[in-house]
Amino acid sequence: MRADKLGTMSAELYFEDFAVGQIFAPEETYTLTVDAIKAFAAEWDPQPFHLDEAAAEESFFHGLAASGWQTACIAMRLRVRNLHVAGGMIGAGVDEIRWTQAVRPGDTLRISHEVLSVRRLASRPEYGVIKAETAVLNQHDEVVMRMKVNFLAPVRSSESAG
Amino acid sequence: MRADKLGTMSAELYFEDFAVGQIFAPEETYTLTVDAIKAFAAEWDPQPFHLDEAAAEESFFHGLAASGWQTACIAMRLRVRNLHVAGGMIGAGVDEIRWTQAVRPGDTLRISHEVLSVRRLASRPEYGVIKAETAVLNQHDEVVMRMKVNFLAPVRSSESAG
């Protein structure tokens, strides 16, 4: 499979479909409104700089900013809706998240997702683990978050699958 | 400050208040309902095993399970509502997340948060970075998620603060 093909595949993907260096860059974007930032923060990250414009002006962020966890959730949403792993995208842990720039109301985010490594699981030979780096970019092509994620993909032709 | 005091403090915390080995274990819990699991998943992790009981039975999870990102958000909610860093809890990156057990409808989650290291920031001497591990536990005292997080804390008596 050519690297540039992964982003346009709608078929279900198996372990054998992934290879190091593939880049998956779906067209779908997510635009954050003030209301969406405040609603997320009220539930999961209730801090003044995510909830109130005036308080945010006086804060570290110098203005209303989205919770970093909302950015992480947007990355998951864009992965799941556009990269169809057979049986679902099952997380096998995150190795690193770095928030590199504040996300503001009106920002339009997209992801670029690069495969870093692929390996079969000794403990569960019917699965492999894909390690990938998701970069989340805004409308100015600035990276606002990077995360290294691991997820499972089933082996298409496993002789040991039960 | 004694380690067991951190969990009961309501005052705002500064860099100097943190020390390696402190454990912060607030009493607040979060109970997941079926509706809450499905609502979160519909927005951020729309996969059958988080959205539909029948499909979930046939999946890797053998029953409806919460998105791992919802568990991460619950951890943030419980940290923010119970550990009051002066100026707010500002994330400086996550080093690792591991999901160790499925979270099911009706599970009641709590956190235990241990300080792993503290260091002043050379680049911004008015801040320090606290590295801590948050364990999320269910009502059976099983760890369902572990995450190593970094957050900023302002220095109380900084001669270089502007």
Image: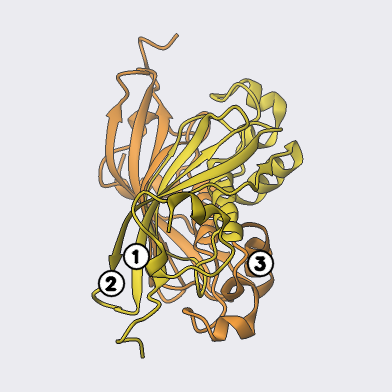
Chain colours: A orange, B yellow
Question: Badge 1 local density, few (<14 within 10 Å), some, or many (20+)?
Answer: many
Residue at numbered disc 2: B121
Quadrant assignment for the N terminus of chain A: top left
Q: Position of residue A111 (x, y in %)?
A: 44, 58
Q: Whole-Å distance between the Cαs marked 2 and 1?
A: 7 Å
Q: Position of residue A122 (x, y in %)?
A: 30, 19
Q: Position of residue B116 (x, y in %)?
A: 34, 51
- Which residue is depicted at the point 47% across and 62% down? A110
Q: Whole-Å distance between the Cαs marked 2 and 3?
A: 32 Å
Q: Are marks 2 and 3 on the same chain?
A: no
Residue at numbered disc 1: B129
- Which residue is depicted at the point 51% across and 50% down? A76
Identify the chain of the residue marked 3, using the numbered disc in the image. A
| Labels 2 & 1 near each other (Cβ < 8 A) | yes
Disc nearest the viewer among 2 and 3: 2
- Which residue is depicted at the point 45% across and 8% down? A162
Identify the chain of the residue marked 2, using the numbered disc in the image. B
At label 1, the amino acid type is Val
At label 2, the amino acid type is Leu
Q: Is residue B72 above or below residue A87?
A: below
Residue at numbered disc 3: A36
Question: Badge 2 local density, few (<14 within 10 Å), some, or many (20+)?
Answer: few
Q: Is residue A53 above or below residue A149?
A: below
Q: Give the mark nearest the N terminus, 2 or 1.
A: 2
A16 or B161, nearer to the observer = B161
In this orientation, does residue B23 appear? no
